Amino acid sequence: MDSIDRKILALLQQDSETPLAVISKQVNLSITPCWRRIQKLRESGVIIKHVALCDAKKLNVGVTVFVAVRTNQHTQKWLKQFAAGVRDIPEVLEIYRMSGEFDYLMRVVVPDIAGYDAVYKKLIKEVELYDVSSSFAMEQLKFTTALPLEHAK
């Protein structure tokens, strides 16, 4: 990956619908070599998909809740059951297995506290949990889906 690939990725991360002619001009390539580079980035798995980012407030899921989960069951069976259970809850956007005090951290979006309570009830119905701690985000100070590119090799 060279500086031109990184520039192409930066442009695509800002707006994946940027016309090829605009991208090629901004990276000082003709259209065909620029298109080939984008295709190579797709084929190599660097670009995994194109999506539309939606306004959570306009879709009535403007409340973000970070949910920290602890379990006292560290088995493959429990993990499979947990993963299957949360996979079917659309309000759960992200889940990470963590080191430290909590075992899993989830990012959940809901319309309000009642919406979160419904998600919580779905969660505890699916799998036995030792402890669940929820924190409601008061304000979003930064949000981006663009990954830093200076480390790309």
Image (cartoon, helix red, strand yellow):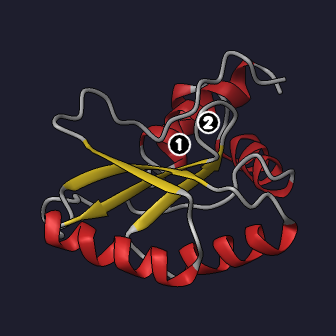
Circle 1/circle 2 CB separation < 8 Å: yes
Which quarter of the image is occupied by the N terminus?
top right
Left or right: where 2 falls relative to 138? right
**Spatial distance from mark 1 to mark 2, Cα to Cα?**
5 Å
Q: Which mark is residue 51?
A: none
Q: Could you tell me the amino acid type at mark 2?
A: Leu
* Residue 47 in view: yes
Left or right: where 16 falls relative to 109? right
Q: What secondary structure is found at the residue carrying circle 2?
A: helix
Which residue is denoted by mark 2 in the rendering?
Answer: 9
Dot 1 surroundings within 10 Å: few (below 14), some, or many (20 or more)?
some
Which residue is denoted by mark 1 in the rendering?
Answer: 12
Dot 2 surroundings within 10 Å: few (below 14), some, or many (20 or more)?
many
Q: Could you tell me the amino acid type at mark 1?
A: Leu
Image height of 149 relative to 45, above or below: above
Decide which of 126, 150 is in the foreground and name it. Answer: 126
Q: Position of residue 109 (x, y in %)?
A: 30, 61
Which quarter of the image is occupied by the C terminus?
top right
Q: Residue at x 34, y 74 (%)?
A: 119
Q: Residue at x 83, y 49 (%)?
A: 40
Decide which of 106, 49 is in the foreground and name it. Answer: 106
Q: Position of residue 97 (x, y in %)?
A: 68, 48
Q: Residue at x 59, y 73 (%)?
A: 128
